[in-house]
Amino acid sequence: MVCLDKSLELLSMAITRKPACQNRCARRSSVNTRPFMSLPAAITGEIRQLDSGYSRETRSLLFRAYRHDPTFAYLFNAEREGYEQRVLATIRQLVKQHFLQNQPALGLFLQDRLVGVALIAPPQRRLGVTESWAWRLRMVMDTGLGCTQRYLAYYNAVLACVPSETVHVLPLIGLDPEFQGQKLGQDLSEQLLAALHDWCAVDEHSQGIVVDTGNPLYLEFYKRQGYEEIGEIAVGPVREHVFFHPNPQVSLPVPDVMA
């Protein structure tokens, strides 16, 4: 049996702690932040709760959102042949395991088209997917031992910035790249985050949301949404920033998400 718990020499993870809030939750992000020129800004999407019936659309959207992500480019070796296949396999395994464990997810729709996704792991289950040996074995088979070790080391380094277990973890969050670089995309990203904030605020066992990103274009965007930076890690040449957003008083009635 392949042992994935040996020293992960392939990835140097220098963790820098910053003054932290009381309770936090974590995960990656590929939401949009840049302005748009031609589509109306007043368009509002519909938030729905997703289940495994949306697995195919979820995988497709997240693959397109993450294949050019700088952190994924390092973790899955974009310079080596087969990079997109490794990213696709990783997204497939993460989404499959997430729904297999009946963990929640929110989707943002425009006219019945899925344009934004956030996978959510409740506080008591935030390590569930990556702790599965079946998932780890499939990752080794699909992406190789080195890439699997890099991903696990990255994931654990992000969690090391989070001192509390009373958190919601967002394993993956993304917006359809078609809307990135647009004012509409920024508005949709803000809508998805607002729905996540209100959704997580209902859980009395959670104190907030943490998101991490290695894309410098998103840093100011998160700060404008009320996130504070609580840590930074080195993922190879990429500086991964970890942000915290405390649970708000629910701003509106919790979205009547459609299952």
Image: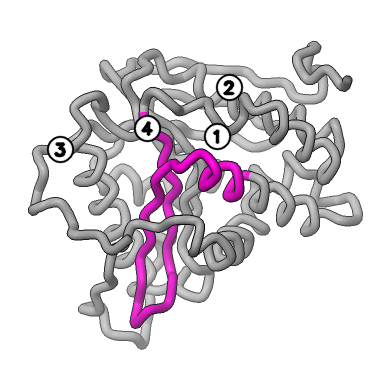
Residue 102, percent from left and from top:
45, 43
- Would you name the residue on which mark 2 appears? 157
Q: Residue 163's x, y, as percent?
A: 39, 13
Separation of marks 4 and 3 at Cα, in angstroms: 17 Å
Which residues lie in the magenta part? 94-122
Give yes or no for contact between labels 3 and 2 (Cβ–Cβ under 8 Å).
no
Image quadrant of residue 231?
top left
Q: What residue sits 62% from the left and 18% below the top? A: 14
| Of labels 1 and 2, the one closer to you | 2
Q: Which residue is drawn at 9% across and 38% down?
A: 249
Q: Is residue 102 magenta?
A: yes
The type of residue carrying mark 1 is Glu
Q: Which residue is drawn at 77% across and 58% down?
A: 84
> Disc 4 marks which residue?
122
Magenta highlight on residue 14: no
Q: Earlier in the sequence, mark 4 or mark 2?
A: 4
Label 1–label 2 contact, CB within 8 A:
yes
Distance in Å between CA atoms under marks 1 and 4: 23 Å
Residue at horizontal 34%, vertical 73%?
Answer: 183
Callout 2: helix, strand or loop? helix
Give the residue type at disc 2.
Ala
Res. 240 mark: 1
Mark 3 = which residue? 248
Q: How is the image coloured?
A: one colour
Q: Is residue 160 above or below residue 82?
A: above
